[in-house]
Image (tube, rainbow, N blue to C red):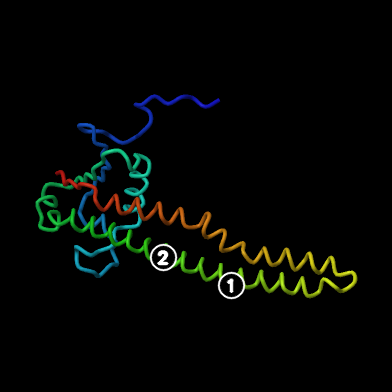
Amino acid sequence: MMALLTPQHQSVYRRESGVWLIELKLRELRQLFHLLDPAPFREKDLDPGAEQYIVEAFREIGHDKPARLVIHLPAVEAASEEARSLPEAVAHYFDYRARQERIELRSLLKRGVASLAIGLAFLFACLWLRRSLSGLADDSLFAEGLLIIGWVALWRPVEIFLYDWWPIYRRERRLAAIARLPIEIRS
């Protein structure tokens, strides 16, 4: 039997003045970014582990609850010019990732429309062939096979439009919401 969770056991994240905190404690600022990315500071990719932690923390807290990203740095690092531009860099990164997800969603839906057109054309061809062969003796097995394979051709577009787009849409919404999170640097 599952134990009921009390509110204080629902999350490992702290709250301050009613705002959930997603906290990262770093020894140096560059830990937050992908080491091999040659882009200027404000356009660097986040470290995959840092990105995953932030996204998962936001998902666990919930998109409908107020949250803030708090990055703890040593005083020297927190006073640097790069630290002052960190909120802009993190917001830029998550906004970029949200745009990538929107592009992926549009691409998937275009693929779904093309697949639907091909599937419907194939289904109609199978139905036409089935009807054309209806006068032949002992054609029931072949006719039923044409009917089944015609409907199976619609499997992928139906899968795209019913199921495949939801996870991409949710990811895009989550990343866009993270891009708008207030970010605080603490030493």
In the rendered image of this protein, does residue 134 appear above or below residue 169? below
Q: Quadrant of residue 14?
A: top left
Q: What residue type is labelled 1?
A: Ile
Quadrant in which the N terminus is drawn: top right
Q: Earlier in the sequence, mark 2 or mark 1?
A: 2
Residue 82 location in percent, x, y?
14, 58
Number of other residues with Cα within 10 Å of mark 2, as a class: few under 14, some 14 to 19, many 20 or more: some
Q: Quadrant of residue 146?
A: bottom right
Disc 2 from disc 1: Cα separation:
18 Å
Between 148 and 62, the one lying in front of the other is 148
On the image, numbered disc 1 is attached to which residue?
Answer: 118
Q: What element carries label 2?
A: helix
Quadrant in which the C terminus is drawn: top left
Number of other residues with Cα within 10 Å of mark 1, as a class: few under 14, some 14 to 19, many 20 or more: some
Residue 89's disc number? none
Q: Is residue 44 left or right of residue 129?
A: left
Whether residues under marks 2 and 1 lie with C-beta atoms below 8 angstroms apart, the answer is: no
Between 8 and 33, the one lying in front of the other is 8
In the rendered image of this protein, does residue 23 appear above or below residue 130? above
Residue 17 location in percent, x, y?
20, 31
Q: What element carries label 1?
A: helix
Residue 72 location in percent, x, y?
20, 45
Q: What residue type is labelled 2?
A: Arg
Residue 106's disc number? 2
Between 76 and 100, the one lying in front of the other is 100
Residue sitting at x 73%, y 65%: 147
